[in-house]
Image: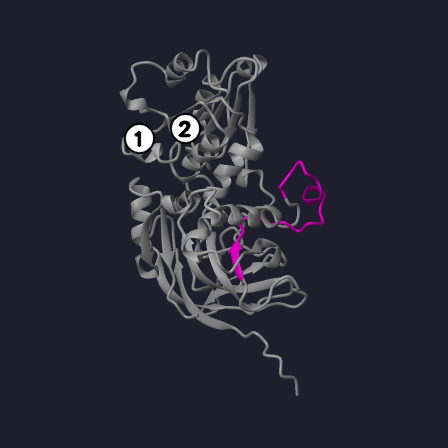
Amino acid sequence: MSSIKEPRVITCKAAVAWGPEEPLVLEDVELDPPHPMEIRIKVVCTSLCRSDITQWESKAQAPLFPRIFGHEASGIVESTGEGVTEFKEGDHVLTLFTGECRTCRHCKSDKSNMCQVLGLERRGLMHSDQKTRFSIRGKPIYHYCAVSSFSEYTIVHSGCAVKISSTAPLEKICLLSCGVAAGLGAAWKVANISEGSNVVIFGLGTVGLSIAQGAKLRGAFRIIGVDTNPEKHEKGKAFGITDFINPDDCNEPISQVIKRITDGGADYSFECVGDTSMITTALQSCSDGWGLTVTLGVPKVKPEVTAHYGLLLSGRTLKGSLFGGWKPKSDLPSLVDMYLKKEIQIDQFITHNLQFEEINKAFDLMRQGKCLRCVIHMPRQY
């Protein structure tokens, strides 16, 4: 008789969204054992990202409900599926909302992090078989970004997780699986900010402030933060913001204010609001000849981008950024090491620590602009 313990269906608590903008409900859900090349994870900590709220509100895309949101998480491998050799039970991991198969054309290229096999999943299903792993009384529950970390346990493809040092605090390091890493990468990999440059950041949430941190570490001369929340002024200083502009206090277009204080426009501008109309403003705020605008925000409405051709004809560049250009499995361990060496900040982004049953409070705080990151702590069963 075999002594190998085969993973079975488990029942656990998950925060289920039953409809757009409806409060999440803690439900008993059934979670399948991991399929081939999948791992089942005991979620230790997960944090709320703005994109979770955007999808929950269902203003930009067709609604998919019932659904388990969450994608920014840390956890411990509980079991592995057939063919998995990279992970074993007990490994500490970060989940990845966009994966890395390491064999497709994009994964083999140093020009892209857009995996053709395990890229951003938008249909609420698993990559491998286009089915769900969660259910309630036989009713399938949609996933989010093939992660669904608002659950005590979840399943991801092995290419959508990365093993990290067991010395990294799981209650902090979870922020690197999306927001903080996305901002640092936008500053370092996508824009490649140079020393002595002028930078403007539209939207001072976690991503925007991570860009500020990255710009400061690159030696930017002026880092301008633009936000309608006056509380972001003081918060921004800790991450490198040198100048703060509240559009509500201005009597002229923001781009004119920025051009004046930068002597013609910023070298780099970043749109982190999730408002496509801001992209034109970001482009206008850049310098003729070499100004680079990077857009990172997930739009809540109107996903189409429009801009006058003259802004590009004058030498400006518009670039998009997904996860800061990082190849997640290849690059995230180095960011974890930087954190452990105290070379980058993460703790300062955590404004609230909440228990799993308080998850709706986290949604309220973010919608009201009263937090950067709320870390949600799962019941300790490990």
Is 66 one of the magenta-colored residues? Answer: no
Which of label 2 and label 1 is nearer to you? 1
Q: Is label 1 in a helix, a strand or a loop? A: helix
Q: Is label 2 in a helix, a strand or a loop? A: strand
Is 104 one of the magenta-colored residues? Answer: yes
Q: Nearer the viewer, residue 184 or 134?
A: 184
Q: Position of residue 75 (x, y in %)?
A: 48, 60
Q: Main secondary structure of the magenta part?
A: loop
Total residue callouts: 2
Say which amino acid is labelled 1. His
Q: Position of residue 217 (x, y in %)?
A: 48, 33
Say which amino acid is labelled 2. Phe
Display coloring: one colour
Instruction: Indicate whether 240 appears above or below 377.
Output: above
Bounds of the magenta span? 92-114
Can residue 305 be seen?
yes
Q: Nearer the viewer, residue 133 or 140?
A: 133
**Residue in the image at 58% along x and 67% along y:** 34
Residue placed furthest toward the bottom: 1
Disc 2 target residue: 202
Q: Nearer the viewer, residue 362 or 233?
A: 233
Q: Quadrant of residue 223?
A: top left
Q: Quadrant of residue 366?
A: top left
Disc 1 target residue: 233
